[in-house]
Amino acid sequence: MIRGLYAAATGMNAQQLRIDVTSNNIANVNTSGFKKDRAEFQDLMYQALNYAGGKTTQNTLNPTGVNVGLGVRLSGVQKNFSQGSLKQTGNPLDLAIEGKGFFQITMPDGTIAYTRNGAFKVDQDGTIVNSNGYKLEPEIVIPQNLTNVSVGLDGTVSAVDPTTGETQQLGQITVVDFVNPAGLRPQGDSLFKSSDSSGDPIEGNPTEDAFGNIRQGMLETSNVKLVNEMIDLITAQRAYEANSKAITTSDEMLSTVNALKR
């Protein structure tokens, strides 16, 4: 019964973590470029009361053994980097990657972070930045005297000089990918950092080497499917209640044992 108490307690903790992950997905259902999380669990070690293959008589062996599980634990929370839907915005600096790849962002400390959120703007110097003012890498500056900024499928940025009518190329947006995107470390603000698990970034131009296209005037929406998250939420709640019932049952059995002496 004591084993049952502890096993059920680990089950309640696991379901609480699952609800935490699901709640975060639901909270970010409208966050551009957000990638949903999935909680993964593993069973804990087993207590062997009788080993498989142990002798039951002089000539026979135990075919299965007796192993009692001790509960469950969280083994990981994995990001799902599947493509989100593209939403038309009409803003020329809203960019979406259709396919594989991440935009590169220069952080204040000089390191590089990665994002799928392409809601870009310009700062006081005309430099393309994200919502926090962090510069897009490679840095691209749009002069004030140029109009009609356009971004091609291959990431080339150009604008028109209204005095001459000529189109000037301002720079090239590059994207990166990773051998294991699930190994990226989320930093908040829709940013990720590379890790030993993700591998080194592989840089290239959009449309080349299996990288995706750049879509101007569009944003990638969250890949969270609200109906699925609600189902997961209900499932986790019911599992939490079942584990709670197991604790109550074990407590009632212990109470019965304690009352035997009366």
Image (cartoon, grey):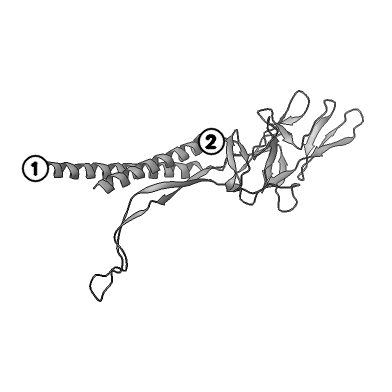
Q: Nearer the viewer, residue 185 or 215?
A: 185
The residue at 79%/37% (across/down) is 150
x and y percent of residue 183 in the render?
A: 58, 47
Q: Which residue is situated farthest in the bottom direction here? A: 59
x and y percent of residue 123 in the render?
A: 74, 25
Q: Are marks 1 and 2 in contact (CB under 8 Å)?
A: no
From what the image shows, is residue 132 above or below residue 44? Answer: above
Determine the image quadrant of residue 161. Answer: top right
* Separation of marks 1 and 2 at Cα, in angstroms: 56 Å
Q: Is residue 11 left or right of residue 132?
A: left
Q: Is residue 81 visible?
A: no
Residue that badge 1 annotates: 261
Q: Is residue 261 visible?
A: yes
The residue at 10%/44% (across/down) is 260
- Quadrant for the C terminus, please: top left
Q: Nearer the viewer, residue 99 or 6?
A: 6
Q: Nearer the viewer, mark 1 or mark 2?
A: 1
Q: Is residue 179 left or right of residue 43?
A: right
Determine the image quadrant of residue 6. Answer: top left
x and y percent of residue 7 in the render?
A: 32, 47
The residue at 43%/42% (across/down) is 18
Q: Which residue is situated farthest in the right direction here? A: 164
From what the image shows, is residue 148 above or below residue 41? Answer: above
Instruction: Determine the secondary structure under disc 2.
Output: loop
Residue that badge 2 annotates: 28
Determine the image quadrant of residue 257. Answer: top left
Instruction: Say few, some or many: other residues with alpha carbon within 10 Å of mark 1 (under 14 / 14 to 19 / 20 or more).
Output: few
